[in-house]
Amino acid sequence: MRWTTVNDTPGWASPGSADDRNTNPPRPAEPAGSSQWADNQPPPAPWSGQTGGHGAPTPPPAPGWGGGPHHGWGVPVAAKPGVIPLRPLGVTEILEGSVATLRGHWPTVLGITLTVSVFAQLCITAADLAFGIEPVKQSAEPGTDEALREAFDSARVALINALPTMFIGLIVTFLVTALLTMVVSRAVLGRKLSLTEAWQEARPRLPQLLGLTFLLPLIAVAIAATAMAPGLLLGGNSGALLLTLGTLVGMPLMIWVMVRFTLAPTALMLERQGVMAALRRSARLVEGAWWRTFGIMLLTILISFVIQLIVGIPFIALGYLADSGGMSDLMAGRTPDSWQFLLVTGIGAVIGYAISYPLSAGVTALLYIDQRIRRESLDLELARVADLPGSGTPSPTSGFTS
Protein backbone atom coordinates (compact mmCIF):
# COMPACT_ATOMS: atom_id res chain seq x y z
CA MET A 1 0.00 0.00 0.00
CA ARG A 2 1.27 3.52 -0.74
CA TRP A 3 0.06 7.07 -0.99
CA THR A 4 -0.63 8.21 -4.48
CA THR A 5 1.28 11.29 -5.56
CA VAL A 6 -0.45 14.59 -5.15
CA ASN A 7 0.63 15.57 -8.64
CA ASP A 8 -1.49 12.73 -10.02
CA THR A 9 -4.61 14.38 -8.65
CA PRO A 10 -6.29 17.30 -10.38
CA GLY A 11 -5.93 19.46 -7.27
CA TRP A 12 -2.70 21.22 -8.29
CA ALA A 13 -3.23 21.61 -12.03
CA SER A 14 -3.53 25.23 -13.13
CA PRO A 15 -6.91 26.22 -14.62
CA GLY A 16 -7.09 25.51 -18.32
CA SER A 17 -4.01 23.29 -18.36
CA ALA A 18 -3.96 19.90 -20.04
CA ASP A 19 -3.91 18.17 -16.66
CA ASP A 20 -6.90 20.16 -15.51
CA ARG A 21 -8.92 19.35 -18.65
CA ASN A 22 -8.00 15.69 -18.84
CA THR A 23 -8.12 14.64 -15.21
CA ASN A 24 -10.94 16.71 -13.77
CA PRO A 25 -14.20 14.99 -14.72
CA PRO A 26 -17.50 16.90 -14.49
CA ARG A 27 -18.88 16.93 -10.98
CA PRO A 28 -22.30 15.47 -10.33
CA ALA A 29 -24.99 17.66 -8.87
CA GLU A 30 -24.60 18.37 -5.16
CA PRO A 31 -26.86 16.29 -2.90
CA ALA A 32 -29.88 18.10 -1.62
CA GLY A 33 -28.83 17.55 1.99
CA SER A 34 -25.32 18.95 1.60
CA SER A 35 -24.94 21.89 3.94
CA GLN A 36 -21.23 22.53 4.07
CA TRP A 37 -20.22 23.24 0.48
CA ALA A 38 -23.49 23.97 -1.33
CA ASP A 39 -24.87 27.50 -1.54
CA ASN A 40 -27.38 27.32 1.30
CA GLN A 41 -30.47 29.48 1.36
CA PRO A 42 -32.56 30.42 4.40
CA PRO A 43 -35.57 28.12 4.99
CA PRO A 44 -38.97 29.25 3.75
CA ALA A 45 -41.22 31.18 6.08
CA PRO A 46 -43.51 28.27 7.16
CA TRP A 47 -40.58 26.72 9.05
CA SER A 48 -39.95 29.79 11.15
CA GLY A 49 -40.53 29.52 14.85
CA GLN A 50 -42.34 32.89 14.79
CA THR A 51 -45.38 31.55 12.94
CA GLY A 52 -48.40 30.27 14.75
CA GLY A 53 -49.24 27.47 12.34
CA HIS A 54 -48.79 23.76 12.75
CA GLY A 55 -45.46 23.58 10.90
CA ALA A 56 -42.54 21.61 12.28
CA PRO A 57 -40.37 23.39 14.85
CA THR A 58 -37.27 25.23 13.74
CA PRO A 59 -34.47 22.73 13.14
CA PRO A 60 -31.19 23.20 15.02
CA PRO A 61 -28.37 24.85 13.08
CA ALA A 62 -26.12 22.52 11.13
CA PRO A 63 -22.62 21.89 12.49
CA GLY A 64 -20.16 24.51 11.41
CA TRP A 65 -22.69 27.30 10.99
CA GLY A 66 -22.70 30.26 13.35
CA GLY A 67 -25.49 32.10 15.03
CA GLY A 68 -28.17 30.98 17.46
CA PRO A 69 -31.93 31.27 17.01
CA HIS A 70 -33.10 34.29 15.02
CA HIS A 71 -29.51 35.28 14.12
CA GLY A 72 -29.49 34.31 10.45
CA TRP A 73 -27.43 31.61 8.86
CA GLY A 74 -23.95 33.01 9.49
CA VAL A 75 -20.81 31.78 7.71
CA PRO A 76 -19.67 28.13 7.59
CA VAL A 77 -16.47 27.30 9.42
CA ALA A 78 -13.81 26.33 6.89
CA ALA A 79 -12.73 22.71 6.87
CA LYS A 80 -9.19 22.05 8.09
CA PRO A 81 -7.97 18.61 6.99
CA GLY A 82 -4.33 19.54 7.55
CA VAL A 83 -2.16 22.41 8.71
CA ILE A 84 -4.33 25.24 7.33
CA PRO A 85 -8.07 25.90 7.00
CA LEU A 86 -9.27 25.67 3.41
CA ARG A 87 -10.06 29.35 2.90
CA PRO A 88 -8.11 32.56 2.24
CA LEU A 89 -5.35 32.82 4.82
CA GLY A 90 -4.06 35.65 6.95
CA VAL A 91 -0.38 36.31 7.58
CA THR A 92 -0.53 34.68 11.01
CA GLU A 93 -2.21 31.57 9.60
CA ILE A 94 0.47 31.22 6.93
CA LEU A 95 3.22 31.40 9.56
CA GLU A 96 1.32 29.05 11.89
CA GLY A 97 0.81 26.59 9.02
CA SER A 98 4.53 26.58 8.31
CA VAL A 99 5.32 25.95 11.97
CA ALA A 100 2.59 23.28 12.16
CA THR A 101 4.21 21.48 9.21
CA LEU A 102 7.52 21.40 11.08
CA ARG A 103 5.86 20.28 14.31
CA GLY A 104 3.50 17.67 12.81
CA HIS A 105 5.90 16.27 10.21
CA TRP A 106 9.18 16.74 12.03
CA PRO A 107 10.80 13.38 11.13
CA THR A 108 10.66 14.21 7.42
CA VAL A 109 11.19 17.96 7.72
CA LEU A 110 14.16 17.75 10.08
CA GLY A 111 15.54 14.80 8.13
CA ILE A 112 15.61 17.01 5.03
CA THR A 113 16.89 20.19 6.64
CA LEU A 114 19.52 18.57 8.87
CA THR A 115 20.91 16.53 5.99
CA VAL A 116 21.05 19.54 3.67
CA SER A 117 22.38 21.87 6.40
CA VAL A 118 25.20 19.53 7.41
CA PHE A 119 26.18 19.07 3.76
CA ALA A 120 26.11 22.82 3.17
CA GLN A 121 28.11 23.68 6.29
CA LEU A 122 30.79 21.11 5.50
CA CYS A 123 31.13 22.52 1.98
CA ILE A 124 31.26 26.13 3.22
CA THR A 125 33.87 25.31 5.85
CA ALA A 126 36.01 23.41 3.36
CA ALA A 127 35.74 26.27 0.84
CA ASP A 128 36.75 28.84 3.46
CA LEU A 129 39.79 26.81 4.47
CA ALA A 130 40.83 26.02 0.90
CA PHE A 131 40.05 29.22 -1.01
CA GLY A 132 39.56 31.92 1.61
CA ILE A 133 41.54 35.12 1.00
CA GLU A 134 42.80 37.31 3.81
CA PRO A 135 40.87 40.60 4.08
CA VAL A 136 42.66 43.71 2.85
CA LYS A 137 44.06 45.81 5.70
CA GLN A 138 42.91 49.43 5.70
CA SER A 139 45.96 51.63 6.34
CA ALA A 140 45.63 54.64 4.02
CA GLU A 141 44.29 58.03 5.03
CA PRO A 142 40.53 58.37 4.46
CA GLY A 143 39.57 60.29 1.33
CA THR A 144 42.81 59.60 -0.57
CA ASP A 145 43.17 57.62 -3.79
CA GLU A 146 44.98 54.91 -1.85
CA ALA A 147 42.01 54.58 0.51
CA LEU A 148 39.66 54.23 -2.45
CA ARG A 149 41.90 51.55 -3.95
CA GLU A 150 41.98 49.66 -0.65
CA ALA A 151 38.20 49.90 -0.35
CA PHE A 152 37.81 48.53 -3.89
CA ASP A 153 40.25 45.69 -3.16
CA SER A 154 38.45 44.91 0.10
CA ALA A 155 35.09 44.71 -1.69
CA ARG A 156 36.60 42.48 -4.38
CA VAL A 157 38.08 40.09 -1.79
CA ALA A 158 34.80 39.98 0.12
CA LEU A 159 32.93 39.13 -3.09
CA ILE A 160 35.40 36.38 -3.99
CA ASN A 161 35.13 34.90 -0.49
CA ALA A 162 31.34 35.03 -0.69
CA LEU A 163 31.06 33.26 -4.06
CA PRO A 164 31.40 29.70 -2.68
CA THR A 165 28.84 30.44 0.02
CA MET A 166 26.44 31.93 -2.55
CA PHE A 167 26.80 28.93 -4.83
CA ILE A 168 26.27 26.46 -2.00
CA GLY A 169 23.29 28.53 -0.84
CA LEU A 170 21.68 28.13 -4.25
CA ILE A 171 22.12 24.35 -4.10
CA VAL A 172 20.63 24.28 -0.60
CA THR A 173 17.67 26.40 -1.73
CA PHE A 174 17.17 24.06 -4.66
CA LEU A 175 17.08 20.91 -2.53
CA VAL A 176 15.02 22.35 0.32
CA THR A 177 12.45 23.85 -2.06
CA ALA A 178 12.09 20.61 -3.99
CA LEU A 179 11.55 18.36 -1.00
CA LEU A 180 9.70 20.62 1.45
CA THR A 181 7.23 21.78 -1.20
CA MET A 182 6.07 18.19 -1.56
CA VAL A 183 5.83 17.79 2.22
CA VAL A 184 3.74 20.97 2.60
CA SER A 185 1.43 19.96 -0.26
CA ARG A 186 0.64 16.75 1.65
CA ALA A 187 0.43 18.48 5.04
CA VAL A 188 -2.32 20.75 3.68
CA LEU A 189 -4.37 17.61 2.97
CA GLY A 190 -3.61 16.07 6.37
CA ARG A 191 -1.31 13.42 4.93
CA LYS A 192 2.23 12.51 5.83
CA LEU A 193 5.17 11.95 3.55
CA SER A 194 8.40 10.14 4.30
CA LEU A 195 11.78 11.41 3.18
CA THR A 196 12.00 8.67 0.55
CA GLU A 197 8.53 9.46 -0.80
CA ALA A 198 9.31 13.18 -0.92
CA TRP A 199 12.44 12.45 -2.96
CA GLN A 200 10.56 10.14 -5.34
CA GLU A 201 7.88 12.75 -5.98
CA ALA A 202 10.31 15.64 -6.39
CA ARG A 203 12.89 13.82 -8.52
CA PRO A 204 11.13 14.17 -11.93
CA ARG A 205 11.02 17.96 -11.52
CA LEU A 206 14.61 18.46 -10.30
CA PRO A 207 16.23 19.38 -13.67
CA GLN A 208 13.66 22.13 -14.32
CA LEU A 209 13.88 23.38 -10.73
CA LEU A 210 17.68 23.47 -10.90
CA GLY A 211 17.49 25.62 -14.02
CA LEU A 212 15.00 27.96 -12.36
CA THR A 213 17.11 28.17 -9.19
CA PHE A 214 20.10 29.50 -11.14
CA LEU A 215 18.03 31.59 -13.55
CA LEU A 216 16.47 33.75 -10.83
CA PRO A 217 19.77 35.14 -9.43
CA LEU A 218 21.04 35.63 -12.98
CA ILE A 219 18.00 37.80 -13.69
CA ALA A 220 18.71 39.80 -10.52
CA VAL A 221 22.39 40.24 -11.42
CA ALA A 222 21.50 41.27 -14.98
CA ILE A 223 19.12 43.96 -13.74
CA ALA A 224 21.64 45.31 -11.21
CA ALA A 225 24.53 45.22 -13.69
CA THR A 226 22.52 47.00 -16.38
CA ALA A 227 21.57 49.77 -13.98
CA MET A 228 25.06 50.27 -12.55
CA ALA A 229 27.21 49.62 -15.65
CA PRO A 230 27.16 53.22 -16.99
CA GLY A 231 28.47 54.61 -13.72
CA LEU A 232 31.16 51.95 -13.42
CA LEU A 233 32.33 52.55 -17.01
CA LEU A 234 32.35 56.35 -16.77
CA GLY A 235 34.35 56.61 -13.55
CA GLY A 236 35.28 59.75 -11.68
CA ASN A 237 32.83 61.98 -9.85
CA SER A 238 30.32 61.86 -12.69
CA GLY A 239 30.53 58.08 -12.71
CA ALA A 240 29.99 57.95 -8.94
CA LEU A 241 26.85 60.07 -9.29
CA LEU A 242 25.60 57.96 -12.17
CA LEU A 243 26.39 54.79 -10.20
CA THR A 244 24.33 56.08 -7.26
CA LEU A 245 21.38 56.88 -9.53
CA GLY A 246 21.69 53.49 -11.20
CA THR A 247 21.64 51.77 -7.83
CA LEU A 248 18.58 53.73 -6.71
CA VAL A 249 16.76 52.66 -9.87
CA GLY A 250 18.13 49.15 -10.27
CA MET A 251 17.64 47.83 -6.74
CA PRO A 252 13.88 48.57 -6.52
CA LEU A 253 13.41 47.12 -10.01
CA MET A 254 15.31 43.99 -9.04
CA ILE A 255 13.22 43.57 -5.88
CA TRP A 256 10.00 44.09 -7.86
CA VAL A 257 10.93 41.40 -10.38
CA MET A 258 12.08 38.92 -7.72
CA VAL A 259 8.84 39.28 -5.77
CA ARG A 260 6.82 38.68 -8.94
CA PHE A 261 8.73 35.42 -9.45
CA THR A 262 8.60 34.33 -5.79
CA LEU A 263 5.99 31.61 -6.38
CA ALA A 264 7.63 30.20 -9.53
CA PRO A 265 9.47 27.30 -7.78
CA THR A 266 6.28 26.11 -6.07
CA ALA A 267 4.28 26.38 -9.31
CA LEU A 268 6.99 24.43 -11.12
CA MET A 269 6.94 21.61 -8.57
CA LEU A 270 3.20 21.25 -7.96
CA GLU A 271 1.76 22.14 -11.37
CA ARG A 272 4.49 20.40 -13.38
CA GLN A 273 5.20 23.63 -15.25
CA GLY A 274 8.26 24.38 -17.34
CA VAL A 275 10.71 27.08 -16.28
CA MET A 276 9.29 29.93 -18.35
CA ALA A 277 5.69 28.81 -17.74
CA ALA A 278 6.36 28.79 -13.99
CA LEU A 279 7.70 32.36 -14.16
CA ARG A 280 4.59 33.51 -16.02
CA ARG A 281 2.36 31.59 -13.61
CA SER A 282 3.99 33.25 -10.59
CA ALA A 283 3.62 36.70 -12.15
CA ARG A 284 -0.11 36.09 -12.68
CA LEU A 285 -0.63 34.88 -9.11
CA VAL A 286 1.28 37.79 -7.59
CA GLU A 287 -0.41 40.38 -9.81
CA GLY A 288 -2.55 42.64 -7.65
CA ALA A 289 -0.99 41.24 -4.46
CA TRP A 290 2.61 42.42 -4.87
CA TRP A 291 2.81 44.43 -1.65
CA ARG A 292 1.20 41.65 0.37
CA THR A 293 3.61 39.09 -1.07
CA PHE A 294 6.56 41.42 -0.49
CA GLY A 295 5.54 42.07 3.12
CA ILE A 296 5.05 38.39 3.96
CA MET A 297 8.36 37.37 2.40
CA LEU A 298 10.21 40.26 4.10
CA LEU A 299 8.69 39.29 7.44
CA THR A 300 9.75 35.67 6.85
CA ILE A 301 13.32 36.74 6.07
CA LEU A 302 13.47 38.83 9.24
CA ILE A 303 12.11 35.98 11.38
CA SER A 304 14.61 33.55 9.84
CA PHE A 305 17.45 36.00 10.46
CA VAL A 306 16.42 36.44 14.09
CA ILE A 307 16.21 32.66 14.57
CA GLN A 308 19.71 32.15 13.16
CA LEU A 309 21.01 35.04 15.26
CA ILE A 310 19.50 33.73 18.49
CA VAL A 311 20.81 30.23 17.83
CA GLY A 312 24.17 31.30 16.44
CA ILE A 313 25.38 33.85 19.01
CA PRO A 314 25.85 31.35 21.88
CA PHE A 315 27.79 29.01 19.58
CA ILE A 316 29.98 31.87 18.36
CA ALA A 317 30.80 32.73 21.98
CA LEU A 318 31.56 29.07 22.68
CA GLY A 319 33.73 28.98 19.55
CA TYR A 320 35.86 31.88 20.81
CA LEU A 321 36.25 30.13 24.16
CA ALA A 322 37.21 26.87 22.46
CA ASP A 323 39.79 28.60 20.27
CA SER A 324 43.36 28.77 21.50
CA GLY A 325 43.38 32.54 21.05
CA GLY A 326 40.52 32.86 23.47
CA MET A 327 38.98 36.27 24.01
CA SER A 328 42.09 38.06 22.70
CA ASP A 329 40.94 37.39 19.13
CA LEU A 330 37.50 38.77 19.94
CA MET A 331 38.91 41.94 21.49
CA ALA A 332 41.22 42.43 18.49
CA GLY A 333 38.35 41.96 16.03
CA ARG A 334 39.88 38.84 14.49
CA THR A 335 37.86 35.82 13.41
CA PRO A 336 39.62 32.57 14.39
CA ASP A 337 40.23 29.99 11.70
CA SER A 338 41.02 27.04 13.97
CA TRP A 339 39.10 23.81 13.55
CA GLN A 340 37.68 24.16 17.08
CA PHE A 341 36.06 27.50 16.26
CA LEU A 342 34.78 26.30 12.88
CA LEU A 343 33.35 23.11 14.39
CA VAL A 344 31.45 24.84 17.19
CA THR A 345 30.08 27.66 15.04
CA GLY A 346 29.24 25.16 12.31
CA ILE A 347 27.05 23.21 14.73
CA GLY A 348 25.20 26.40 15.61
CA ALA A 349 24.71 27.25 11.95
CA VAL A 350 23.30 23.78 11.21
CA ILE A 351 20.78 24.09 14.05
CA GLY A 352 19.74 27.57 12.91
CA TYR A 353 19.32 26.49 9.30
CA ALA A 354 17.38 23.38 10.32
CA ILE A 355 14.77 25.65 11.93
CA SER A 356 14.73 28.55 9.47
CA TYR A 357 14.71 26.56 6.21
CA PRO A 358 11.33 24.88 6.89
CA LEU A 359 9.86 28.24 7.87
CA SER A 360 10.84 30.03 4.66
CA ALA A 361 10.01 27.10 2.36
CA GLY A 362 6.69 26.49 4.12
CA VAL A 363 5.65 30.15 3.91
CA THR A 364 6.39 30.26 0.18
CA ALA A 365 4.37 27.09 -0.50
CA LEU A 366 1.44 28.24 1.66
CA LEU A 367 1.49 31.69 0.08
CA TYR A 368 1.15 30.02 -3.32
CA ILE A 369 -1.79 27.94 -2.06
CA ASP A 370 -3.38 31.03 -0.51
CA GLN A 371 -3.19 32.96 -3.78
CA ARG A 372 -4.78 30.08 -5.66
CA ILE A 373 -7.55 29.83 -3.06
CA ARG A 374 -8.25 33.56 -3.46
CA ARG A 375 -8.15 33.57 -7.26
CA GLU A 376 -9.18 30.07 -8.35
CA SER A 377 -11.19 28.58 -5.45
CA LEU A 378 -8.54 25.93 -4.93
CA ASP A 379 -10.04 25.25 -1.50
CA LEU A 380 -12.99 23.41 -3.12
CA GLU A 381 -10.68 21.20 -5.16
CA LEU A 382 -8.45 20.45 -2.18
CA ALA A 383 -11.51 19.54 -0.11
CA ARG A 384 -12.53 17.09 -2.83
CA VAL A 385 -9.03 15.59 -3.00
CA ALA A 386 -9.03 15.27 0.79
CA ASP A 387 -12.40 13.41 0.59
CA LEU A 388 -14.10 15.83 2.96
CA PRO A 389 -17.83 15.24 3.52
CA GLY A 390 -20.00 17.28 1.21
CA SER A 391 -17.15 18.23 -1.11
CA GLY A 392 -18.38 16.35 -4.14
CA THR A 393 -17.20 13.14 -5.76
CA PRO A 394 -14.07 11.78 -4.02
CA SER A 395 -10.90 12.02 -6.02
CA PRO A 396 -10.20 8.70 -7.74
CA THR A 397 -6.54 9.03 -6.78
CA SER A 398 -6.90 10.27 -3.24
CA GLY A 399 -6.19 8.06 -0.28
CA PHE A 400 -4.40 4.72 -0.56
CA THR A 401 -3.83 2.59 -3.61
CA SER A 402 -2.53 -0.89 -3.79
Image (cartoon, rainbow, N blue to C red):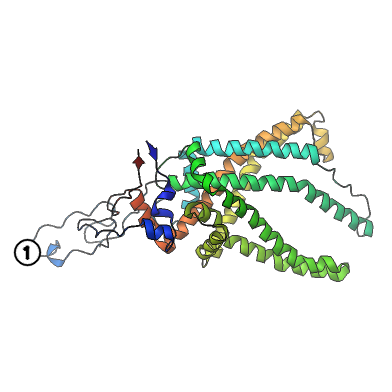
Is 9 situated above or below 251?
above
Coordinates of residue 78 in the picture (x, y in percent)? 35, 54
Q: Quadrant of residue 297?
A: bottom right
Q: Is residue 144 left or right of residue 51?
A: right
Coordinates of residue 267 in the picture (x, y in percent)? 51, 56
Residue type marked 1: Gly
Is 284 situated above or below 154?
below
Between 197 and 238, the one lying in front of the other is 197
Quadrant holding the C terminus: top left
Between 388 and 214, the one lying in front of the other is 214
Q: Residue at x 21, y 58 (%)?
A: 69
Is 226 situated above or below 133?
below
Q: As drawn, which residue projects farthest toward the left? A: 54
Coordinates of residue 271 in the picture (x, y in percent)? 47, 55
For residue 321, say whether it is visible. no
Coordinates of residue 242 in the picture (x, y in percent)? 80, 70
Q: Residues within 10 Å of mark 1 (few under 14, many from 20)?
A: few
Quadrant holding the N terminus: top left
Q: Which residue is mark 1?
A: 53
